Amino acid sequence: MAMKKGTRLLLWITGLGFVIFSAAAIAVVLLVVNDQELPDFEGETSDQAWLDVHLRGPIHDGPKPDSLIVDPEQIPLTVHDISAAIHAAAADDDIDGLVLHLDGHGLGLAGAQDIRSALVAFDEAGKECRAWSKVYENIDWYLASACGELHIHPEGVPMAIGLKVSTTYFAGTFEKLGVSGDFERVGEFKSAIETYENTAPSEPTIHMYTELLDSLYTTFVQDIADGREMSFAEVQALVDDPPVTAQTAVDRGMLDAMTYKDEFDEQIEAELVDLDGYAADLRNSWRRSSEQVAVVHLQGTIIDGESTSGGFGGDNIGDITTVELLERLKDDEDVIAVVLRVDSPGGSALSSDVMWRAIEQLAEEKPVVASMAGYAASGGYYISMPADYIVAEPSTLTGSIGVFGGKFALAGLYEKLGVTTWTQQRGDLANLYNTTEPFSEAERKAIRTRIVAFYDTFVQKAADGRGMTWDEIDAVAGGRVWTGAQAVEVGLVDEVGSLEDAIAIAIELAAPEDPDDIGRRILPRRQTLMEAILKSLNEQQASVDASAQMRNLMGDEAFETMIAGRQLSQVLETGVAAMDPARITIH
């Protein structure tokens, strides 16, 4: 039976009233939370207070543009939140120690390095750190090695078996489907398109991957050796011939003790301070400062348009969204400096240049520091170049100064499917991006001319930003990917360090009267419930839910490949790509 108009109106008004009431209630909670001070542990029953750091995944590097505040007490912590809280605890006289629980955190090597640097600072402050986990794989052991004591469940699994690099190639699949990739590139190391044209990496790419892995492995082993007070050779021996039981891991010095979780907890004779609450109080203290450093997280593929996260489109950095944000920060007198936290494999060359210009203009008004996370390659490096100073994690994959352009020719697939097409054109190049046939010679010349011109621009702007010559940049460009540690050696990055290091440098460059009273503005800002409703949250959530179901059906690798293909198609609509669509996977 159809619902009467009056009934529908009543339900609509009731629903709207509920939304307004909910938003008001949340606003009250926010006001209460914002009025809190940093934790004060005087008068506790224990003589000591330890920060309880429980890492479970997924943990993102920073807030996503579509992230939502429903309950301020339940905001998922980012790498930035965790690292900043540990640094604050290191300087907090009320915090005496730290307990680290590892539970499927999903961190990559760069994220682990950022948090590990905070743990190192905590140790250097003379405070005790103890870690516990059921499993110690590569990243777990690396992260926990900054702590003084490493505990494992008696039947736990030590599986630190070394690093490997891998990529996936689709030329064989495309051949079966009747699809061919038709691309032009500048730079012998610009390996992105090899994913679609080859069945294996080229010799220059193998050389690049080998040196990348050597750099990552050296950092991995040396940091663990420093943390465990062992030699490089001793740690390398543990990796090459790893203990596979908890008992042998303890016997050989990889770990310190076998302890059940309840036993481990009982050994901590202190009041445990919840990390979520401590981080929330820290964020609130930042907001109370009259002068702030804006920390802008740029995560995903660079595209034309609005920034998005999640769903079938993946994470995207939209040039329109980013430019609007940077222009507001440029005019905001409360913001004394800006840190760009870049985690991007690049994307649209044109959109990268649009953002480059906005960052250059921002840097004319106030200090800008680039902080590189897991990826700041190709377009990700391009948008870092105008910064006054560039800091990278040791394992950041960066550089990749090179471009490509092209298309997929689908004639063979159409034939298999019985699809036919008919076109008529006016203009010799009107068929340039026709998806049926490969490029003609005239079309290929046009696309080649464009990507060579953009490569020259890329190199020149990098040279200007780094204070180097065109030839010096070209010698380390050609699409070659470097680790953060390598990038310092070749001049593409100023130093290796964490996001906290980058923020400290930004404050130093701004030279405020009171450097110890500088807050932070973390961007993108999470949406309130009302904002999310006004942006049609239901449709957005449906996309996220559908993508989660598709990921479960396809598996992580196949799903990520599908997302990368979709993003590449979107990027190629602008003609030239400064992108690494086939992300290098480090295990």
Image (spheres, grey):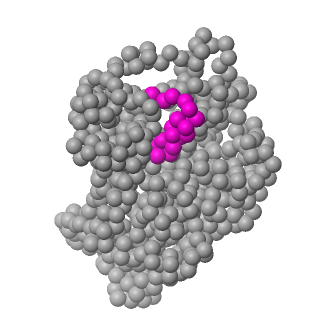
User: Image height check: is 426 above or below 209?
Assistant: below
**Residue in the image at 78% along x and 51% along y:** 512
Residue 5 horizontal/vertical position (percent): 60, 31
Residue 402 horizontal/vertical position (percent): 44, 73
Residue 163 horizontal/vertical position (percent): 31, 50
Quarter-of-image position of residue 255 = top left
Residue 575 horizontal/vertical position (percent): 46, 74
The answer to whether residue 322 of the structure is visible from this angle is no
Q: Nearer the viewer, residue 500 or 399?
A: 500
**Residue in the image at 34% along x and 64% along y:** 211
Q: Magenta stretch: residue 473 in it?
A: no
Q: Nearer the viewer, residue 96 or 74?
A: 96
**Residue in the image at 71% along x and 26% along y:** 36
Q: Is residue 157 left or right of residue 176?
A: right
Total marks shown come to 0
**Residue in the image at 58% along x and 71% along y:** 466
Q: Nearer the viewer, residue 37 or 451?
A: 37
Could you tell me what secondary structure mostly forms the magenta stretch? helix
The answer to whether residue 442 of the structure is visible from this angle is yes
User: Image height check: is 198 above or below 328?
Assistant: below
Q: Magenta stretch: residue 113 in it?
A: yes
Tell me which segment is drawn in magenta. 111-130
User: Image height check: is 152 above or below 348?
Assistant: above
Q: Is residue 538 left or right of residue 524?
A: left
